[in-house]
Image (tube, rainbow, N blue to C red):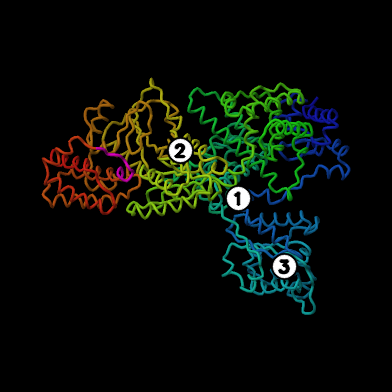
Amino acid sequence: MERKQKVLLALNKLSEKNKELIKFEIGFTAEEVAREAGISRCNASSDLNSLVKAGIVIKFNGRPVRFISKKYYEQYYKSNDSLNTLKIEVDPFSSIIGWNMSLRDAIDEARAAINYPPFGLHTLLIGPTGSGKTYFAKKMFEYAKNIGRISDKSDFVAFNCADYAHNPQLLMSHLFGHIKGAFTGANNEKSGLVDSANNSILFLDEIHRLPPEGQEMLFYLMDTGQYRRLGETNGFRTCQTMIIGATTADPHSSLLNTFYRRFPVVIRIPSLSERPIAEKKLMVKQFFTQEAHKIGRPLKIATDVIKSFIMYDCIGNIGQLINDIKVTCAKALLNAIKNGMYEIKITREDLPPHVKKVLLNDNSCDDFLLINIMLDEEWNFDKEDAYDDDVIGEIYSLLNEKEKNKNTVEKKWSKAKSLLENYYKNHINKIYQNKDRVILNLTNIIGQDVLSIANECVKIIKQNLKVEIDKNILPALALHIYACRERIMSGLRIENPYIDKIKREYPEELNVANMIVELMKERLKLDIPADEASFLAMLIRSNEKNEDAIEKPVGVVVMCYGDSTASSMVATANKIIGSDIAIPIDIPVDSDPKQYLEYAMNEVIRADKGNGVLLLVDIKRFVSWGEIIAAKTGIKINIIENVNTSMVIEAVRKARRMKLEDLSAEIENFNKYPDYWVVDENKKSKTLILTCITGKGTATRLKELIRDLIKDDDINLVTLNINGIDIESGLKADYFKKKEKPVAIVGSVDLKIPGVPFISLEDLFFGDGENRIAKLLNLENVNIDITPTEIENVLKYYLRFLDNKKIYKLCTSIINRLKESGFKLKTHQIINLTLHLSCLVERIISGEDFGKWPKEEKIRSEYKHEWDTVSSALSIIERELNILIPDSEVAYIVQYLMEG
């Protein structure tokens, strides 16, 4: 028997054996057919699709894709009543990516325009080329049909005004029609698009290309519902139509004012660059899925590729994004065919040059770090699978990994909880938050048997837990039980290493979850793993209501030194999460502390909604500011130092569903150094890690400086930022995968790798850093070769928030004052003093406690005149930056000048 016949026979057998079930669940998955036929899922899927093309089998797209033979479909679903019971009516707008985020206001305006009596309000869509205006207009048309505003049999009538822009006569004829003899060649009377759009919607793309006379004829139609065909002079024709126009131009300059005023509703469609990163990720995933369907082969897409498409400058917006993904898939397909591979692997080498360029961008490092929060692994698409975020699978995989390292376990436990909360609070809510507009038939998705079990589970939860459960727990449980059954039947098992933690944190939920597992065993006739209960306990916990946390989120305030440091982090976080909960406070370096403390206090008061404020700061001084604000206002404030963009994103993401103490603990834990900074004591290397706060250009210069210093090509130099990102490539450093122990860390950030010494740039230039490097690398001698003219650039290597040009200018003024007072400074003293003073100012601003130096009094008494001279010179920088240099540092500088 041919395999295809075997597949069809298996499909028919399933239909015979499940006559009752088939009434509730249309068809069978490729996996079910594969099990019945005793072949692989891949082969079953391929044969089923061939049978679909042959017209023998009917395919239902969804999650998962289902198949049924045409014979059984006609037997069971031939009556309209039967089909209507299975119908799913979905709001057309909900299929638009961003419908509940960046496009929410636009969609609300569109709904209002269509619902307005008697036949809707004329609407103008404004947005750049490729932003999706035509697609949006089609969704408006579908929505109008859904609510009965226009007939189900109506067609979407569309016209691009640019097609006839250079021939106004033909354009008007195409739009309004013409009578015989209206112009040369008009041998017969012809109707126009306006006739076709009667009692429907007329979409006019590039409406700004309509000539003035065309605009005048159109607004007469909009005002009166009447028009004339080209050449007509007597009488008017009537037409009831809603006009949707679209333009890329400024309507004020490209449309007649009288015409523009005829559009009561103007909707702006944002460009791709204005869309949140979360939406871009969904678009990229959807477009790759579509290509997998077209090509008919599975795709494996490298993380670099995904990140590049999310982050690159896509001038042509969504239209260009689709084309670039098609070009990439075409190139990868060619390589797969050339190499005799069925699966298509898409790597960075397949990217178009303008997309690949983002991987080498000087400023892409932080952006890639943010994407890493949302995307850690490559994507895999089966050619037949409908698109969905396989969050459940990700959590299963996460929990199934065994880790001995305590920090890693804590981190993964936290991530699993977070993933689950996000999935059930966002994905499931997406289905039910518009109940009046979305009628979802759960039976059609997961089957009557699973839905019945889920209903019983809800009863068990309500009977045994004293807390109120979210109403959306039913679909959450139903989908989870369905996924659990599919995984077990596929031979997958789960082992949860966090069972003890769940027993401790969720004892009541775990008890109820065990009852559910017993019910599942009995009803599904499957061996359910015991650890499944721990996962169910997490699910139940994530659906317990916490109204206060939703209605009164924790305030998030970011306070940093610099003109835009805090604002930049907050803007990025709010854009990614699609929120406005975080508030930035930028404190200029030369600001008046009293004035800005008052400003900071007012911002914290504004941020507090009643559940306290999480204050994220970059230096110690602001810790004391937070304490002062808390004391004066009575607001509960938790303070966390060393803020970075990743922390702000995490805080904004969790602020709406966690209490202040829990949120603080999460962010404190999130701020721990990454687990990949783990080294093997026995694996030595000749590597120096160079850490830098700024971008690629500065990192490259630092690398050159150190290379000149050590003059040994065998020493490996790796430039990293605080998050373990290789500054030169913008990607996660491969070095740590080897777990080799570096010789030392040199630069402006201590990565705190156990047992690895840190040499700051201040030590390198001012202290004994040279000798320490020489000793660690077994070198005879190292010398820093730097000239005074290079100091200003060198300052960029380790200044966190001070402007290198400004501080260099102040240091130069101090050195000139010292020279004028009689100090004869050598070149190396000028260099070292400039570097030391720059570091000193940052340490003072950061609130470092300097303490008292034992030699302080001795230096003051021995060098009284010099002390006064140095103090006077230092007052230049004290006045300018509103700081006070401690006596211990004055003593240190005096000693250096007199004895160094």
Camera-side residue: 859 or 709? 859
Residue 82 in sight from this viewpoint: yes
Task: Residue 133: name its quadrant.
Answer: bottom right
Any mark on residue 175, and which? 3
Q: What stretch is highlighted in magenta?
A: 842-851
Q: Nearer the viewer, mark 1 or mark 2?
A: 1
Q: How crowded is mark 2: few (under 14 residues within 10 Å), some or many (20 or more)?
A: many
Q: Which numbered disc covers residue 101?
A: 1
Counting residues from the start of the chain, the first of labels 1 and 3 encountered is 1
Residue 349 at least partly seen: no
Image label count: 3
**For the residue labelled by badge 1, is the local secondary structure a helix, a strand or a loop?**
loop
Q: Which of 768 and 731 is in front in this view?
A: 768
Q: Where is residue 791 in the image (x, y as percent from the top left)?
A: 25, 46
Q: In this view, does 120 lie above or below 659?
A: below
Mark 3 closeness class: few <14, some 14–19, many ≥20 residues within 10 Å: many
